[in-house]
């Protein structure tokens, strides 16, 4: 980090960062497989710097698949409309539009839908990924009610000059990725290219007969160019990324529809951190373009232009604070909009950290968000206390926050049905937890409760579907992670478990039943065995309890629970300066027939071979 | 001897034939005496279903297509259904298919898959006539098919988005969805189509005892898609193809319509209020209509039907598709009888 070396805080940041750098550089070749899951507190410009009291899980993605495959590696539930199809996230019992997605700090949920299709983003284009559960609106703006997904590529890691990645798998899975790094003086550049296809004619059982899925093939393309320039007073970063996804929309098992969807997404950012003796300034300018073309004719396109300025300074020994402003302009076209629709936003925010007796850290965030003629004030306050801090560490933490989400373009402008009178959704969120960490064992437990009012729901009125602020939702739950590692002979064994219990009830419904597509229980367990740092075997089990499609919660709209077991074998070699990693993965090893979304087939047991070459 | 045998066979066959018309015959199937609720299902969820309601015992059976046929699903958006000659045709709009089952056992007979966005059907001269949107922005069509096999024998051209279809006076009357047209196809000369312009939102139709056609027009919207509150009801003379009567409702509504067994009373709903109109006498157009009754507990009405056996009025509540649907039953005088649970989005009723 390039902040001044005044306080413990900063020393801590540097220490963590270096530690993390070491881990990133050393670990990928020896950890289990696709991702490296760990509780790391800070990376780059730390996303959780002013989020004392919450938990952030950071993940170093491997090259495989798309972002929704996080579901295979954690207890996070993604609603997947088939294999390689639309995938939306559910964090803390909310819906797809209640998770904010940030790309290098830019909020990039589609302004038309207010959500992200995670299947369009190849893992190969993402360096760092963090999941912040719970409301982060005071830090991240509209939509961060259930949580935030933070994608960060801002620091080019000296991984390898050239990386080649290739994968083949069942039912016509094929992936290819290449990346190259260049160093010119203080300038670092990295270029990445990804191409993937899935023929997706996987077999599944229908009325006791094995049939093959039809009309579900997917083609993906991704490109990214990143630049870092570090000088004494500047940390300059720029990235342009483009992804393309062409898919046949997988029909439900009772249908033979022939719909196709093509999506394109472009992201651009240039940012500068300017360091001077007494303060640091952050400047960034970003642009996001999203386009979907349904059945080759129906085009929806949106643009977002975002400018950001913040200044950060140290006050005395124990206070650090930041003041900033964000301006955002979005415009969109769709067949069902009357004209090019526009929305402006202006955010004023301030964040403060108070470090007391080096054992207590308090964070205060204030945000005034102005969306056209609506103004929302969202504060949050959080704190953590570390009563034990020696070889082991115990941390007690808690946070109270307000969250909000403004209506989407479709809510406001979609004809017929749009409702320009909609209010923003508002939420109050509380959470508390403890973390215990020792050399080889860690445990983290968090309890949370939140209430979301003015929840927007599309309902039919006189034959026309229209969005209304009708739902009041009360959510409570528990999250826990536990990890333990120990040696057996020369092998290192690592166990990680993740359990989430979520009760998400609609108070405006008759019986206060569970919201559709919110599983009550979600469980993830991973057991990895690593031998001589070159060979590893990982088994993982991911369980999702039953979901309902309606608020009735009756058997008619019930989707059964499922548990998927994966087994991954991995081996690395080094020949001269070239390192090779080969991986064989078996997914859904028990060949379970299951549905994620109602009446949508999913693949049974399937295989995948991957090869990564680093030079 | 031989003569006697023939005679007795003849007597026997007569007995059998008369037995076929007898109410005390062996049951045709477990769903013989009852009401079938068409539950459209949520768009793209493929969770359309049929609920069976026994009108005497009150027994309920959900998702009967799935349970009888051991099928995981029936289809996506069951737009409508029609029972004829012991077969029930279930038209799955977004599945591009028609599932045909035995009306009384619900055992699957065959599936018509060579159809594109099918909507409604009728029977004329022993053949099935099925409207198909084909695609948005494209010309729709009416498929002519063999009722026993589902084989498509012919296609009749028609305007955009052909919706409901009614047969009368050897003519097909077809409404235009999201439009204001009534297409009239004379089966004696199918190449020429007469188009009448009616009110905005031409939707469903019924035929009254005088063989006049009632067309429900749900109302239109302006360029900003605000409702124009111009919903209406039209009465068409099916012989002369002329508009005989237009009733302005001064509100938009669902465009769903039903008629009683004597075909002299028409029912429709606006919001939660159910209205009736005497089909055979000209109403006083200067008087505003007053509701017959209100389904006050309903959240979002989505379908209406009248049992031809009992004249009991059935209304389906979609509950905004957020819950399982519910069906409310009312006497012809509008007094509430009871309600029962249905599937998602109950949009219509078939009466066995």
Image (cartoon, rainbow, N blue to C red):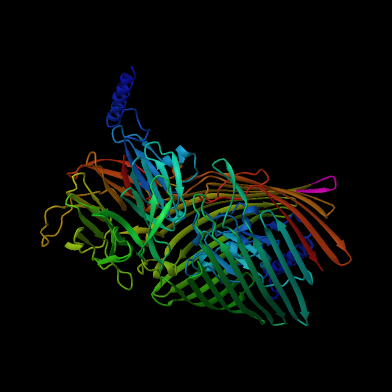
Image coords of residue B269 (percent x, y): 24, 54
Instruction: Residue at the far front: name it.
Output: B2
Q: Nearer the viewer, residue A612 or A129?
A: A612
Q: What segment carries the magenta color?
A: A487-493
Q: Residue at x 85, y 48 (%)?
A: A490
Q: Is any atom of residue A10 visible in this view?
A: yes
| In-front residue for pair B55/A301 | B55
Q: Is residue A395 left or right of residue B41?
A: right
Q: Name the residue at 15% across, 57% down.
A: B289
The image position of residue B164, as x and y in percent, is 31, 57
Q: Nearer the viewer, residue A57 or B154?
A: B154
> Which residue occupies the foreground of this view, A484 or A268?
A268
Residue A436 is left or right of residue B218, and the answer is right
From the viewer's perspective, tell me whether residue A349 is left or right of residue A36. Answer: left
Q: Quadrant of residue A280?
A: bottom right
Q: Position of residue B230 (x, y in %)?
A: 23, 66
Position of residue A10 measured from the top left corner of the image (x, y, whole percent): 69, 70
* The quadrant where residue A370 appears: bottom left
Can residue A40 be seen from the camera position used here? Answer: no
On screen, residue B250 versus residue A356, left or right, reads left
Q: In what quadrant of the picture does the N terminus of chain A appear? A: bottom right
Please name the predominant secondary structure of the magenta segment in the image: strand
Up-down relation of residue A317 to residue B218 (above or below):
below
* B323 is higher (above) or lower (below) than B176: above
Q: Check residue A488 for magenta coloring.
A: yes
Is A79 within the magenta?
no
The C terminus of chain A is located in which quarter?
bottom right
């Amino acid at each position: 980090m390039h902040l001044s070396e005044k306080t413990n805080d900063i020393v801590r940041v540097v220490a963590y960062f270096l530690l993390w750098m070491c881990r990133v550089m050393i670990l990928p070749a020896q950890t289990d497989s696709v991702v490296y899951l760990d509780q790391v507190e800070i990376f780059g410009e730390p996303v959780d710097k002013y989020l004392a009291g919450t938990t952030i899980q950071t993940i170093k993605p491997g090259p495989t698949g798309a972002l929704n495959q996080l579901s295979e590696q954690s207890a996070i539930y993604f609603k997947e409309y088939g294999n390689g199809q639309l995938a939306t996230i559910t964090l803390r019992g909310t819906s797809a539009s209640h998770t904010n997605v940030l790309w290098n700090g830019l909020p990039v949920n589609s302004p038309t839908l207010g959500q992200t299709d995670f299947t369009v983003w190849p893992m190969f284009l993402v360096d760092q990924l963090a999941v912040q559960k719970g409301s982060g609106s005071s830090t991240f703006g509209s939509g961060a009610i259930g949580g935030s997904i933070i994608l960060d590529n801002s620091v080019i890691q000296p991984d390898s000059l050239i990386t080649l990645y290739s994968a083949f798998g069942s039912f016509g899975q094929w992936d290819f990725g290449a990346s190259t790094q260049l160093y010119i003086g203080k300038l670092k550049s990295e270029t990445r290219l990804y191409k993937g296809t899935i023929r997706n004619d996987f077999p599944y059982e229908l009325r006791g007969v094995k049939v093959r899925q039809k009309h579900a093939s997917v083609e993906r393309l991704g490109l990214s160019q990143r630049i870092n320039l570090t000088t004494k007073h500047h940390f300059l970063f720029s990235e342009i990324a483009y992804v393309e996804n062409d898919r046949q929309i997988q029909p439900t098992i009772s249908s033979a529809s022939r719909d196709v969807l093509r999506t394109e997404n472009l992201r651009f950012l240039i940012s500068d951190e300017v360091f001077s003796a007494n303060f640091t300034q952050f400047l960034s300018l970003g642009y996001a373009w999203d386009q979907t073309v349904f059945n080759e004719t129906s085009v929806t396109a949106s643009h977002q232009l975002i400018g950001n300025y913040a200044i950060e300074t140290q006050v005395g020994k124990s206070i650090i604070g930041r003041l900033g402003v964000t301006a955002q302009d979005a415009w969109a076209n769709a067949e069902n909009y009357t004209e090019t629709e526009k929305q402006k936003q202006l955010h004023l925010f301030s964040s403060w950290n108070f470090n007391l007796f080096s054992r207590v850290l308090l964070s205060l965030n204030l945000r005034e968000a102005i969306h056209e003629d609506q103004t929302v004030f969202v504060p949050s306050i959080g704190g953590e206390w570390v009563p034990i801090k020696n070889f082991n560490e115990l941390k007690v933490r808690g946070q109270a926050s307000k969250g909000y989400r403004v209506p989407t373009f479709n809510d406001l402008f979609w004809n017929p049905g749009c409702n320009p009178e909609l209010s923003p959704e508002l939420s109050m969120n509380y959470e508390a937890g403890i973390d215990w960490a020792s050399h080889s064992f860690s445990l983290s437990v968090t309890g949370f409760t939140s209430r979301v009012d003015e929840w927007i729901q599309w309902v039919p009125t006189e034959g026309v579907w229209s969005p209304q602020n009708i739902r009041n939702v009360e959510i409570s739950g528990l999250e826990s992670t536990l990890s333990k590692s120990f040696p057996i002979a020369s092998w290192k064994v690592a166990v990680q478990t993740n359990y989430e219990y979520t009760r998400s009830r609609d108070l405006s419904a008759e019986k206060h039943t569970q919201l559709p597509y919110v599983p009550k229980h979600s469980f993830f367990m991973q057991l990895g065995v690593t031998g001589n740092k070159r060979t590893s075997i990982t088994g993982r089990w991911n369980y999702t309890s039953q979901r309902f499609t309606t608020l009735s919660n009756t058997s008619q709209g019930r989707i059964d629970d499922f548990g998927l077991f994966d087994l991954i074998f991995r081996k690395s070699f080094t020949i001269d300066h070239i390192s090779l990693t080969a991986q064989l993965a078996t997914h859904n090893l028990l060949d379970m027939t299951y549905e994620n979304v109602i009446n949508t087939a999913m693949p049974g047991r399937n295989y995948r071979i991957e090869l990564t070459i680093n030079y | 001897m031989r003569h006697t045998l023939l005679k007795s066979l003849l007597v026997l066959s007569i007995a059998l034939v008369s037995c076929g018309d007898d109410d005390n015959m062996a049951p045709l199937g477990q769903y013989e005496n009852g009401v079938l609720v068409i539950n459209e299902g949520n768009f793209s969820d493929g969770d359309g279903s049929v609920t069976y309601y026994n009108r005497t015992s009150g027994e309920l059976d959900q998702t009967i297509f799935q349970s009888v046929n051991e099928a995981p699903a029936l289809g996506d958006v069951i737009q409508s259904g029609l029972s004829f000659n012991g077969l029930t045709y279930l038209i799955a709009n977004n599945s591009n298919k028609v599932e045909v089952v035995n009306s009384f056992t619900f055992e699957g007979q065959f599936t018509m898959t060579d159809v594109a966005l099918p909507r409604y059907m009728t029977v004329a001269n022993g053949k099935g006539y099925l409207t198909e949107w084909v695609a948005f922005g494209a010309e729709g069509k009416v498929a002519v098919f063999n009722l026993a096999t589902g084989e498509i024998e012919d296609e009749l051209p028609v305007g955009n988005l052909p919706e409901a279809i009614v047969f009368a006076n050897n003519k097909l009357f077809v409404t235009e969805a999201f439009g204001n047209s009534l297409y009239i196809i004379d089966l004696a000369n199918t190449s020429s189509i007469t188009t009448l312009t009616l009110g905005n939102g031409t939707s469903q139709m019924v035929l009254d005892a005088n063989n006049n056609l009632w067309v429900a027009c749900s109302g239109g919207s302006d360029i900003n898609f605000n409702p124009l509150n111009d919903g209406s009801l039209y009465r068409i003379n099916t012989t002369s193809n002329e508009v005989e009567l237009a009733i302005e409702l001064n509100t938009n509504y669902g465009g769903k319509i039903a008629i009683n067994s004597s075909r002299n009373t028409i029912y429709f709903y606006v919001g939660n209020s159910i209205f009736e109109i005497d089909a055979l006498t000209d109403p006083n157009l200067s008087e505003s209509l007053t509701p017959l009754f209100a389904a006050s507990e309903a959240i979002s009405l989505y379908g209406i039907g009248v049992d031809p056996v009992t004249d009991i009025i059935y209304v389906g509540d979609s509950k905004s598709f957020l819950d399982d649907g519910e069906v409310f039953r009312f006497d012809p005088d509008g007094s509430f009888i009871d309600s029962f649970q249905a599937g998602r989005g109950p949009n219509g009723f078939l009466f066995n």
